[in-house]
């Protein structure tokens, strides 16, 4: 059955505010470079006032992936909760301008729209300070089973698992996709997220609810509770039809039906900002799946998209990904 959308992404709808920062500034604010912390609205306003001028763009992990998918010419929609406020309007306008259909109505009873204050130091490390606000209020009612059934792949981010109603919304989406015979893709999001929800994530995998699982090297080791990368991959791979693991400068691997494919990282001119690298890798890979490409080509598309986004600030591609990928995969 033909789908209206190739991919439908569900995640935390967060406005990213990205600005340069020095190591001294991080020390003054007591921030651990390269970390992600959750903050309240008061701290978000305080830190925002101290930041250098920055760029504001609709983000969140799955939102970045959705924008990358659309940039590759693949039809995509997004579900994520925003408030009926200025940042909520910015989020909707920005993601729709990127070519993504935004399917969630803004609400006035969920607090303020979420934002992530991203401080980028000269070594390209990003330190993230996240106020989840309305994003954490995604309710099961926001999930339309008909929309899920009309998407070839539903892609979900593990970050949403922290609140019971958001978790319920994700499971509702998974069940709707399974009932419609569609694929479910899931990203583990963060090793700390795994430490909080490892049992639930393993249950989803063992129950066969995930068709494509995305992880990075640290996350797969954390999930499998193994000290060795290869052992961790061997532990998890038999339980998911497709396992995709990124390894930063070491490239990525995918395991599907016992076949293991490897891909080198794409060469880059300069590493500027690693924000969104994993999100854009997932975008490229999912776009390849939607286009019916072979496993190594899906990995290649992921590598191309990730390499483009780490050479500038922000988690949105600035070069034409369709042109970049056509030149490599023609």
Image: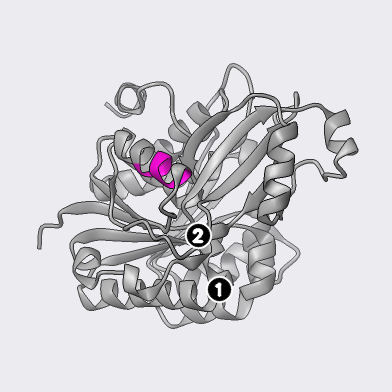
**Mark 2 secondary-structure assignment:** helix
Foreground residue, 318 or 79?
Answer: 79
**Mark pair 2, 1: CA separation:** 12 Å
Instruction: Tell me where residue 262 appears, x and y as whole percent.
Output: 50, 45
Q: State the image quarter where residue 230 is shown.
A: bottom right
Query: Farthest residue in the left direction?
Result: 1
Foreground residue, 142 or 270?
Answer: 142
Question: In the rendered structure, does residue 88 fall within the stretch colored magenta?
Answer: yes
User: Is any atom of residue 297 visible in this view?
Assistant: no
The magenta segment is 87-92
**189 vs 149: above or below:** above
Residue 330 in the figure: left or right of residue 301: left
Residue 192 in the figure: left or right of residue 185: right
Locate the N terminus and report the quarter of the image it occupies: bottom left
Question: In the rendered structure, does residue 225 fall within the stretch colored magenta?
Answer: no
Q: Residue 134 carries which label?
A: 2
**Mark 1 secondary-structure assignment:** loop
Q: Residue 163 carries which label?
A: 1
């Amino acid at each position: 059955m033909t789908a209206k959308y190739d991919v439908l992404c569900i995640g935390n709808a967060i406005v990213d505010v990205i600005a340069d920062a020095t190591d001294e500034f991080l020390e003054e604010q007591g921030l651990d470079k390269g970390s992600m912390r959750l903050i309240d609205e008061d701290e978000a306003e305080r830190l925002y006032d101290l930041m250098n001028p920055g760029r504001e763009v609709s983000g969140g992990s799955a939102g970045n992936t959705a924008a990358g998918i659309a940039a590759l010419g693949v039809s995509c929609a997004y579900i994520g909760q925003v408030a009926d406020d200025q940042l909520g309007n910015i989020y909707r306008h920005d993601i729709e301008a990127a070519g993504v259909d935004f399917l969630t109505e803004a609400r006035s009873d969920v607090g303020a729209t979420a934002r992530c204050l991203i401080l980028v130091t000269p070594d390209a490390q990003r330190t993230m300070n996240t106020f989840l606000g309305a994003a954490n209020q995604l309710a099961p009612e926001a999930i339309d089973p008909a929309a899920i059934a009309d998407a070839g792949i539903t892609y979900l981010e593990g970050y949403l698992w922290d609140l019971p109603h958001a978790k319920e919304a994700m499971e509702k989406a998974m069940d709707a996709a399974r009932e419609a015979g569609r694929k479910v893709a899931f990203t583990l999001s963060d090793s700390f997220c795994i430490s909080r929800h490892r049992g639930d994530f393993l249950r989803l995998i063992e129950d066969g609810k995930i068709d494509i699982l995305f992880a990075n090297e640290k996350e797969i080791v954390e999930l499998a509770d193994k000290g060795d990368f290869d052992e961790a991959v061997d532990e998890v791979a038999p339980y998911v039809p497709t396992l995709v693991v990124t390894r930063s400068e070491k490239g990525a691997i995918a395991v599907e039906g016992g076949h293991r494919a490897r891909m080198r990282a794409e060469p880059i001119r300069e590493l500027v900002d690693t924000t969104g690298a994993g999100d854009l890798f997932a975008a490229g890979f999912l776009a390849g799946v939607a286009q019916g490409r072979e496993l190594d080509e899906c990995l290649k598309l992921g590598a191309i998209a990730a390499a483009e986004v780490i050479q500038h600030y922000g988690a949105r591609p600035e070069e034409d990904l369709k042109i970049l990928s056509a030149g490599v995969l023609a």
